[in-house]
Amino acid sequence: MRLARPFALLLLLALLAPAGAAADVLGVFPNDRLTRKDSRQVTGLRVALPLRNCRARPSDCNERHLVNQLDGFDIDPRIAIRFDRPIDVAKVTPSSLYVQRVRGGPRIGVNRIVWSPARNALYAQPVVLLEESTRYRIVVGRALGGRRVGRRFTTMTATAPLRRMRAQLDDGSAYERAGIAAADRGLSFVRPGGLRTVFAAPSVVRITRFNDTGAGALQEELVPNTAVLGAGQYAFGSLRAPSWLDGDSTIAQTPTRTGVPRVTGRAELGFTMIVPAGAKPAGGWPVAVFGPGITRSKYDLFLAADENAARGIATVAIDPVGHAFGPRSEVAVDTLAGSRRFSGFGRGRDRDGDGKVSDQEGVQAPGQPHPKASLGLRDGLRQTALDNMALVRAIARGVDVDGDGSVDLRRDGVGYYAQSLGGIYGTMLMATDQTVPFGLLNVPGGPILEIARLSPGFRDQVTAQLRDRRPALLNGGRAGFTESTPLYADPPVAAPARGAVAIQDVGAMVNWLNRPGSPETFAPLLRERPAPGVGAKRVAYQVALGDRTVPNPTSATIVRGGGLLDVTTFYRNDRTPTAASDPHGFLLDPRIAGRNLGQRQVVELLASAGGSPIDPDGGANVFETPVTDPLTLERLNFEVAPARGEPPPEAALPPIRVSVTPRRVRARRVVRLRVRATRPAADRRRAVRRAFVRVRGRRARTNRRGRATIRVRFRRAGRARVVVSKPKLFAGRATVRVLRSSR
């Protein structure tokens, strides 16, 4: 009988204690505890990540400095949950790990799951893009953590800055700050000296570019021209537009509620234009703007508008930021009457000081190890979207192409279509500009970093950034690195390559920083959640199966994000005689089988002012309108070259074993806990020196014998956790039972 009460007490404690195999959650990210209050922001918060070890890891700290200017966490956050021991990844389900709006709503499951044995950490992302400026909670169920854990976080305000800059165009303040008078805000066809650069299309024999590639003579390049059917005039000119970019091709971050992005200057933008032949309709010819792709230029208009003029549509294009080579670039138009040569308004600059100007130099922030390197293309894309908005507003002022004193182009109802990069900034343009009601975007994708790492043609650019970081993160493998990052529909990765999770860390940070200038952010605004005063758009997308330049999973991110599957056409180049080619350029490249039908779909949508996209091959199997199997979009659909020199899987780190005395203490008393930390060695346990000990906000460090003493006062009864951690070792824990105060 004497043993009855102690035995009963031990049995009760055993029943109340969590099972020995259950893991304990040590940390959850994102988490609003890593923010501070800021009334200048839409969310009322500002991110405040700690800056640690900046001397040894300056690139990480540079990114944190930039992130700490934002008013919330990523809308596609990389969720990180640290445990004190391994878990069964198969137990990650929509009921054991999910995201939910704080105010209620459906549970959002996760995918793209990675388990890191070296960190005892689970990484995942929500299955849908989250809404911006919204509070969510991450819930870890008992099936994973032994106890239910919830943490709140707030998503960033991502689209408002671009909408605010567009508003500056609307009210004229951007032009005023840029020093552009009202009379100079239209399109100009007259060059210095009085030369009018408008030519009768039938008289044009040849168009030639002279590209400024840096020091030395200009490089000659013939402009291919297939836009002859129904063309009346080929016109060249310029417009002046405000610029928000600084010298690093970035736009300064301002508070999202009270801040106003600052105009930094102006730029003169060259354009190309094709005007239909024949009698213009009342009010002028309808207009479509074409957006060129990466490394391409406004001269691609002559490959992108084969049928537009014949259908009575005038088409115009400008260059993206940093494109069309350097400012000395020129263009010559040879006609039956002679040749005229004039400025090509190249937008490239020698940013790296090597004496050369590439076909896209200046569109992105400087590379690593520059403090702004991780902003990448974010602001070059936003500025290019704004440049196209300025173009549309210049058209609205009235355009007299031939100089006869009458308006030749319709002022409103401007459509938009684009290829590749043009579809990326075009998604941003259409989502935020109320004056562009319809359009078609060809082969866009996002985020930019995902395009680069998945594309065989761009992967080496990611290699260069990882190589030039401080410290470098190259770990071996294809193009020098292995990231072990699963695609949207892939199974969990339970054995990532050594060094891969660190690369994933950087990727998540870069995507977060770039979200305000990334197309998937703006896709929901097209139809599902239109921005105030903008309205829903009549829009269509074209994607090419097996695209090796903008891989299909990145296009799927936009399609999923905007709920655009019903207006997406899938070009099946694999079912054509040109199946061996990269289908990315099928809209422009005469060598690819789908070009003519792809342009037919474009012109029908433009002519109908945004009607439902037609099936251009009439129900045959080359163009799927809409996509037959959405999961096909989530795969690469091309073979990847075998990797060489891949690193081995990361190894689980040795665990720290923690012992603490006393194991029982009284609440409301100052007690001295004696902690000992050891780790397994060959035939014995070895002391863990200089490890961090944490108990209820109190901290200490172990000595050379692995021991530490820490004084702490527990306010209430319950269980208190003692955690010991050290880099390259698993954190260990022990539990102290806190009894009620005897008073």
Image (cartoon, rainbow, N blue to C red):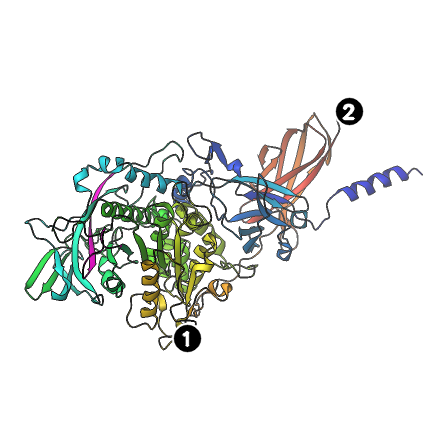
Read off the residue under disc 1: 575
Q: Residue at x 36, y 69 (%)?
A: 582
Query: Looking at this rendering, what residue extends furthest in the right direction?
Result: 1
Query: Looking at this rendering, what residue extends furthest in the front direction?
Result: 282
Along the line of sight, which residue is nearer the eye, 360 or 429? 429
Q: Amino acid at mark 2?
A: Ser
- Assess whether mark 2 and mark 1 are in contact (beta carbons under 8 angstroms): no
Of callouts 1 and 2, which one flags the residue occurring earlier in the amino acid sequence?
A: 1
Label 1, residues with CA under 10 Å away: few <14, some 14-19, many ≥20: few
Q: Residue at x 65, y 45 (%)?
A: 24
Please identify the quarter of the rendering in which residue 208 is found. bottom left
Left or right, 66 with reference to 316: right
Read off the residue under disc 2: 742
Q: CA distance from mark 1 to mark 2?
A: 81 Å
Quadrant in the picture for the C terminus: top right
Residue 112, position as x, y percentages in the image: 53, 56
Q: Is residue 268 magenta?
A: yes
Label 2, residues with CA under 10 Å away: few <14, some 14-19, many ≥20: few
- Give the answer, above or below, for where 627 lies relative to 722: below
Along the line of sight, which residue is nearer the eye, 677 or 362? 362
Q: Residue at x 32, y 65 (%)?
A: 599
Please report the bounds of the magenta region as a residue range: 264-286
Query: Looking at this rendering, what residue extends furthest in the bottom direction?
Result: 577
Residue 722, position as x, y percentages in the image: 64, 38
Q: Is residue 653 magenta?
A: no
Quadrant in the picture for the N terminus: top right
Nearer the viewer's eye, disc 1 or disc 2?
Answer: 1
